[in-house]
Image (spheres, rainbow, N blue to C red):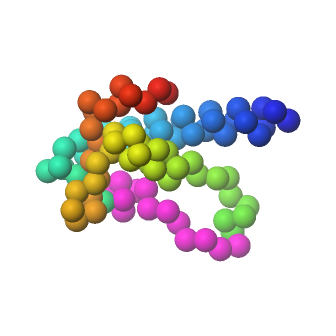
Amino acid sequence: MILAFFILPQWRIRRAIRQVIEIFREYEANRPSTAKTLEQLGLRQERGGLLVLFRRRDYKKLALDILIRAQAIQQIEDGRLYLLEEELWQIRL
């Protein structure tokens, strides 16, 4: 039970952080001139509904929020995002 409530979600969040970083690298969104929107990165959160109850939780939105709070992902004026590789060392994966 402890595994299911504490360890498994932490593992999924770490995995989602790595996935989000890889998405930014794949789309080469690593400086303001190449910043991308959430839609371009494929990270736009899906709308709710009854079917959401039957799907596995997607931790990528939480991972994105963590990376933004850690300042590893920056947002420019028009809402586009880019990855700061220099700031990734602060995040312990």
Compared to residue 73, the image places residue 40 above or below, namely below
Residue 86 shown left or right of residue 60 in the figure: left
Q: Main secondary structure of the magenta part?
A: loop
Where is residue 8 drawn, in percent x and y? Answer: 70, 35
Q: Is residue 24 visible?
A: no
Where is residue 54 drawn, in percent x and y? Answer: 73, 61
Q: Is residue 5 visible?
A: yes
State the residue lying farthest toward the left.
33
Compared to residue 77, the image places residue 22 above or below, namely above
Where is residue 64 drawn, in percent x and y? Answer: 44, 48
How many marks overall? 0
State the residue lying farthest toward the right.
1
Residue at 78% x, 32% y is: 3
Magenta extent: 38-50
Q: Does residue 62 belong to the magenta stretch?
A: no
Residue 52 shown left or right of residue 81 in the figure: right
Q: Does residue 40 belong to the magenta stretch?
A: yes
Q: Determine the image quadrant of residue 85.
A: top left
Q: The N terminus is located in which quarter? A: top right
Tell which of 69 and 81 is nearer to you.
69
Residue 8 shown left or right of residue 37 in the figure: right
Residue at 78% x, 37% y is: 4
